[in-house]
Image: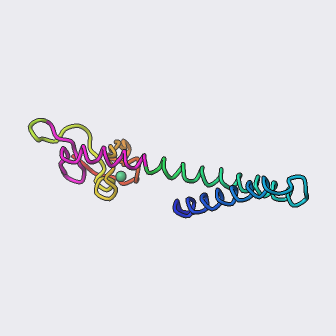
Amino acid sequence: MTSRNSLVALLSSVNKSFELAKAIREGAADSTDGALRMAELVATIIDCKFYVAEVEAFVRDRERRISELEQALQIKGHLIRFEDAYYETDSDGQRAGSPYCSRCWEADHRAIHLSRAPLVQSWLCPQCKSTFTLT
Ligand SMILES: [Zn+2]
């Protein structure tokens, strides 16, 4: 379910809960109809909790992605490409530090450090699993 669908479903469930609570308050809570409406209200509130959890997960994911993009924006002006990887630059504009994955940077704007793959003499991206041969 998409976040927009979750929001629509949440609002619908909240409205339905409100209408059920109003009907119970105005009607015969002791009657069979009142008992059925009360059971429906409880089920609808449970639906609300489910949709709230989905929306919360979506918001957390978006906040994480915003943070990643803010970091990418800060580092963007300090990266240079050398061979098949990106490096931060020192005060002289020369490459410094360990390499970043060019695939992750160019496709997703994620600065992911490469790790040495000792058995094959290459570098491995822990995110996308791309391998690079760097000097
Ligand atoms: Zn990668």
Position of residue 19 in the picture relative to residue 86 (left or right): right
Q: Residue furthest left?
A: 92
Residue 92 place in picture, x, y as percent: 8, 37
Q: Nearer the viewer, residue 50 or 98?
A: 50
Residue 130 place in picture, x, y as percent: 36, 54
Say whether residue 74 is visible. Answer: yes
Q: Is residue 65 magenta?
A: yes
Q: Nearer the viewer, residue 118 or 131?
A: 131
Position of residue 17 in the picture relative to residue 94 (left or right): right
Range of residues picked out in magenta:
63-90
Residue 33 place in picture, x, y as percent: 87, 61
Position of residue 101 in the picture relative to residue 29 (left or right): left
Residue 79 place in picture, x, y as percent: 20, 46
Q: Residue furthest front?
A: 26
Q: How many marks?
A: 0
Q: Indicate how the structure is coloured in the image.
A: rainbow
Report the quarter where the N terminus lies.
bottom right
Say whether residue 122 is visible. Answer: no
The residue shown at (27%, 51%) is: 133
The residue shown at (55%, 59%) is: 7
Q: Residue furthest top?
A: 91
Position of residue 10 in the picture relative to residue 60 (left or right): right
Q: Is residue 72 magenta?
A: yes
Image height check: is 43 above or below 112?
A: below
Q: Nearer the viewer, residue 73 or 9?
A: 9
The residue shown at (79%, 55%) is: 24
